[in-house]
Image (cartoon, rainbow, N blue to C red):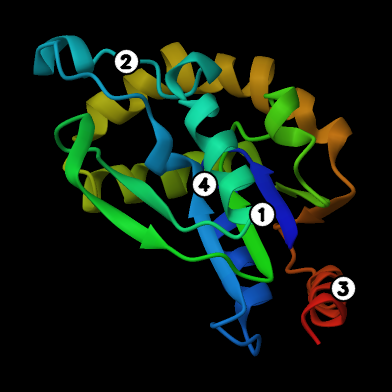
Amino acid sequence: MLIIGIAGGTGSGKTTVVNQIMNELPLTEVGIIAQDSYYKESKNTSYEERSKTNFDHPKSIDFELLVTHLKDLKAGKTINQPIYSFSTHNRTEETILTQPRKVIIVEGILIFSNPELRDLFDIKIFVHADSDERLIRRLKRDIDERGRDMEEVLTRYQTTLKPMHQQFIETTKEFADVIIPNDKFNSVAIDVVRAVINQRIL
C-alpha cells in the first residue's frame, strides 16, 4: 500500500490537488482519508464549550485513532472512518466503511505535525498558497458550508488560525518531499505524483 500525505494551510487548495491527482486514476484502487474526520469526540461537553475548541491545534486531532486506522488498512483490514459535524462540533453516530486500497491519500492541515503519522507516509506533499488567498477561501467555506458568520470566521482567524498556522503548519513544510505552489497551478508536480501512483497500482 502506498500512503500519500497532503498537507498545507486551511484554504490552500489541498482538496483541489487531491482531485487533480485522483483524476484519471481508477477509483477502486485509491482511497481518501480526511484529517477533519478525526477531530476528537466531545460527548460530555456543551455546544458552547465545543465551539471554543481550537481546531487548528494538534491537540484537537485524534492522531492515535488515525494512525491505528492507517496501520489497519495497510494490514488489509477494513476500518470504520468517523464522520465529524462542524455544525455541532462533534462526531456523528455514523461512520464510513473504508476498504484497503493500493493507494491511500490522507489530507489535512496538521498531518505532518505528528511524527508517528508522518512516518507512515511514503510521499509527503505540501500545498502552499498566499495567506490572503487562504483567508478568502476559508471565509467562503465556513460561511457557505459550515453556517458561520463573517465576524466569527475573522475572529477565529486572528486569534487561532493565523498563529496556529505559523506555529504548527508552516513549520512542517520542511518534511515535504514535494511542495506544490497553488498560486499558479503546478501541473508538472501533479503529473509526477500521478506517475508514481500509477507505477504502484499497475
- Which of discs 2 and 3 lies nearer the camera? The answer is 3
Pointer 4 residue: 11
Q: Kindly tell me whether residue 129 is visible in this rendering.
A: no
Residue 53, which numbered label? 2
- Of 183 and 88, nearer the camera is 88
Task: Kindly report the distance in space between the C-alpha atoms of the residues bearing marks 2 and 1.
Answer: 31 Å
- Using the rendered view, name the quadrant where residue 58 is placed: top right
Is residue 196 placed above or below 61 in the rendered structure?
A: below
Task: Kindly report the distance in space between the C-alpha atoms of the residues bearing marks 2 and 3.
Answer: 38 Å
Describe residue 191's horizontal placement relative to residue 139 as left or right: right
- Which of discs 4 and 1 lies nearer the camera? The answer is 1
- Neighbor class of circle 1 (other Cα within 10 Å; few <14, some 14-19, many 20+) is some
Q: Position of residue 113 (x, y in %)?
A: 68, 25
> Residue visible at 42% across and 36% down?
38
Pointer 3 residue: 196
Pointer 1 residue: 74
* Residue type at the position of mark 3: Val
